[in-house]
Image (cartoon, grey):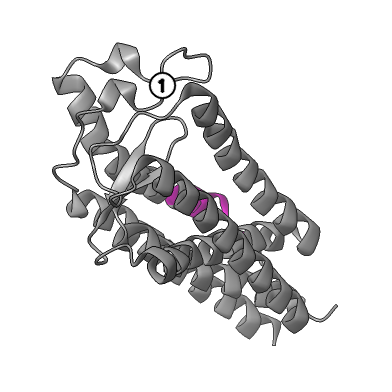
Amino acid sequence: MSIKNKIIWLTLFSIAMGFMEAAVVIYLRKIYYPAGFQFPLIPIDNDIALVEFLREAATIIMLVGVGALAGKASSQKFAFFIYCFSIWDIFYYIFLKVFLNWPQSFFTWDILFLIPVPWVGPVLAPCLVSANMIVFSILIVFQVEKGLSSAIKLNEWIMLSIGSFIIIFSFVLDYFTYVTQTNTTAGIWTLGSHQNLFNEIKNYVPQNYNWFIFLMGETLIIYTIIQYKRRINNLKTNTL
């Protein structure tokens, strides 16, 4: 299969996954938020919470799997994974907007992830991360297709990892601030929990998203992508 057709199919797969993700969330919101989604979060029955928790893990496994099957070199497998993840994430919000007219704006708060604790932040933040990942993935994919080295160096992996952890920290900071101030850390929901999901934070309303911390992580990731692009350009020049 040509790289063009492969990208088309991976894009369609990711859009379809985005729709499936949105469909599940639409059902959950009809059940738990008939008047429209808003914080504080309504406790979710333990059996549904377990399924939802595992569904998120299954989603990541599916995205990793399709990347591994579609890619050639290890770097391209990683590239296809982050490409599919990004398309899935962006279209998830597009479908929610189409069917629920939500979010109201790019700065609307959302619960982004549940593993291992709730991640929260304005919708704009994960969309910006996804845009970065799409650019980076395209660079890697076409580098491999040209038969050139696409390996990500150790120092680049380190900077990408640090940048990612900083961004993740920005997503969980407000939540950890809440549970620390209210002394609810002992009640954080786990897979073996007998209480309903979000029961321990049923009064939690996000207060402050630290854009400065987020932009620190974004800047480091963008810098690393630029450095990667410069390095592979130098490799092409030297090869010629």
Answer left or right for 181 relative to 40. left
Q: Is residue 104 above or below residue 190?
A: below
Q: Quadrant of the C terminus?
A: bottom right
Q: Position of residue 10 (x, y in %)?
A: 69, 69
The amino acid at mark 1 is: Asn
Secondary structure, mark 1, is loop
Q: Position of residue 190 (x, y in %)?
A: 47, 19
The residue indicated by pointer 1 is: 196
Q: Position of residue 22 (x, y in %)?
A: 50, 57
Q: Position of residue 204 (x, y in %)?
A: 21, 32
Question: Which residue is depicted at the point 75% across and 77% down?
Answer: 145
Answer left or right for 182 relative to 238. left
From this viewpoint, which residue is outermost toward the bottom? 240
Does the magenta run of residues contain 210? no
- What secondary structure is the magenta-colored segment mainly? helix
Residue range (magenta): 152-159
Q: Quadrant of the N terminus?
A: bottom right
